Image (cartoon, rainbow, N blue to C red):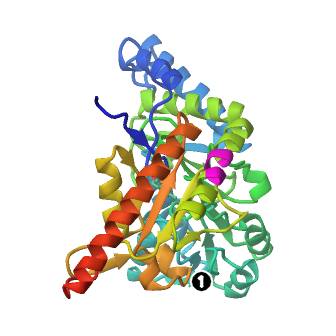
């Protein structure tokens, strides 16, 4: 009997919703026109894009003309940071962010440092939260931009973006937030958050890969990264990914409609799983904020295991999750997020992220629990054996 595979890695990516696939199909066949063309083929494609823009805008409580379609979350983050830095460099060259941002923000900030900007990386508490007062204290006369993610992709912690944005607005500082993990899982209203810029990506909410958007509040100074044919209000030039954009619109429409219900379901599955893990596995530590946390995600550090070994063992049993630490025969790299929360290195080594999604059920979570219990027993027994033989500390 082939075993059913269970996907519990929805923070990495999600399967396409069937209605999303259906919405895209015409744009992969008969409605192939270039949206910039004047003729009927072009107008059909344009219509697809503009109705998707309305849906994405509506999911964010934004106006359609404030939505710039991009190739995904990474590009949206890059345009936000590089585009504002370029547009405002005459006013100042200081940027504030956190130490636990996604690589798309963190490495863009490092790049800006190489270009002569200075960046303050705010610390987080043990739950992975930025202190809004610390953010306000970090603002200087030459601060032009603050970028704090709405929800973290590794531990699920939700940041006090609205409070930070209020302090920034008083000083005329542009506010960006990476909401890629948040959209479809918690409310992401741009006015409630008070942001100027917000990054989102379709493939994290049952839409297609390779498409996302940057919300740009009217009047926000921003320069493009690509120069070309004046698409997307000249902020993102290049012929649009029409089918992808249409699928993204559909994914937003669906997720806005079922947000509350989905949130409740996911949280019930996750919370039950969390208490079962606590009861069944010794030496576990849960990462992220107990309340201010995404509903679908659980980050667990399991003592005397290695995260990547747990992932491989679970994969053999047909269960897909991801690790928070990568261990190669000699060197160990613990994620910058877990490190920033100050978790002891020894415990941080055994970090796994389980993220539930669309088709997951309580039964899936129960199967994952049984597999996890077996895996932890096996790895701990192997570790004991290796240590008694004087072997490596990390497998
Ligand atoms: C996935 C992710 C991204 C990158 O989005 P892509 O569309 O895959 O480029 C950025 N930020 C966060 C928080 C993410 O989870």
Can residue 257 be seen from the camera position used here?
Answer: yes
Magenta segment's dominant SS is helix
Q: How many marks?
A: 1
Is 93 magenta? The answer is: no
Please provide percent x and percent y for residue 55: 64, 32
Give the residue pinned by disc 1.
123
Q: Which of 11 and 147 is in front in this view?
A: 11
Indicate whether 295 appears above or below 336: above
Q: In which quarter of the image is residue 225?
A: bottom left
Disc 1: CA contacts within 10 A as few (<14), some (14-19) or many (>=20): some
Q: Is residue 341 above or below residue 288?
A: below
User: As drawn, is 146 to the left or to the right of 165?
Assistant: left
Secondary structure under badge 1? loop
Residue at 44% over, 19% down: 42
Q: Position of residue 14 (x, y in %)?
A: 46, 41
Q: What stretch is highlighted in magenta?
A: 267-272
Q: Which residue is drawn at 54% across and 84% down?
A: 342
Residue 62 drawn at (x, y percent): 71, 43
Q: Residue 213, image x and y in percent?
A: 53, 45
């Amino acid at each position: 009997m082939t075993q059913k595979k269970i996907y519990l890695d929805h923070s990495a990516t999600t399967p396409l919703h069937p209605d999303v696939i259906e919405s895209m199909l015409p744009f992969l066949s008969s409605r192939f026109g270039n949206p910039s063309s004047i003729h009927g083929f072009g107008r059909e494609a344009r219509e697809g894009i503009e109705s998707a823009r309305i849906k994405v805008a509506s999911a964010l409580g934004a106006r359609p003309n404030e939505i710039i379609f991009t190739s995904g979350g990474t590009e949206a983050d890059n345009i936000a940071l590089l585009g504002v830095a370029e547009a405002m460099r005459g006013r100042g060259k200081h940027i504030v962010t956190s130490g636990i941002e996604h690589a798309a923000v963190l490495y863009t900030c490092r790049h800006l440092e190489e270009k002569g900007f200075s960046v303050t990386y705010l610390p987080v508490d043990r739950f992975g939260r930025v202190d809004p007062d610390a953010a306000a204290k970090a603002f200087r006369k030459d601060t032009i931009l603050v970028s704090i993610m709405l929800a973290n992709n590794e531990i699920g912690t939700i940041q006090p973006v609205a409070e930070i944005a209020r302090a920034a607005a008083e000083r005329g500082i542009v506010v960006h937030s990476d909401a890629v993990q948040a959209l479809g899982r918690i409310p992401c209203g741009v006015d409630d958050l008070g942001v100027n810029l917000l990054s989102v990506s379709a493939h994290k909410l049952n839409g297609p890969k390779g498409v996302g958007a940057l919300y740009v509040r009217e009047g926000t100074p921003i320069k493009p990264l690509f120069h070309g044919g004046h698409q997307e209000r000249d902020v993102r030039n290049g012929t649009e990914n029409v089918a992808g954009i249409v699928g993204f619109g559909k994914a937003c429409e669906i997720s806005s409609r079922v947000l509350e219900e989905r949130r409740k379901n996911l949280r019930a599955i996750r919370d039950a799983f969390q208490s079962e893990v606590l009861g069944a596995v010794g030496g576990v530590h849960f990462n992220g904020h107990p309340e201010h946390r995404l509903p679908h995600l659980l980050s667990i550090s399991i003592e005397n295991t290695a995260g990547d070994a747990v992932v491989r063992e679970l994969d053999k049993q047909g269960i897909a999750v991801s690790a928070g630490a990568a261990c190669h025969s000699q060197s160990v790299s613990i994620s910058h997020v877990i490190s920033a929360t100050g978790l002891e290195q020894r415990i941080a080594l055994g970090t796994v992220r389980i993220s539930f999604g669309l088709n997951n059920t309580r039964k899936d979570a129960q199967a994952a629990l049984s597999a996890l219990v077996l895996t932890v027993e096996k790895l701990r027994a192997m570790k004991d054996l290796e240590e008694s033989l004087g072997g490596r500390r990390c497998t």
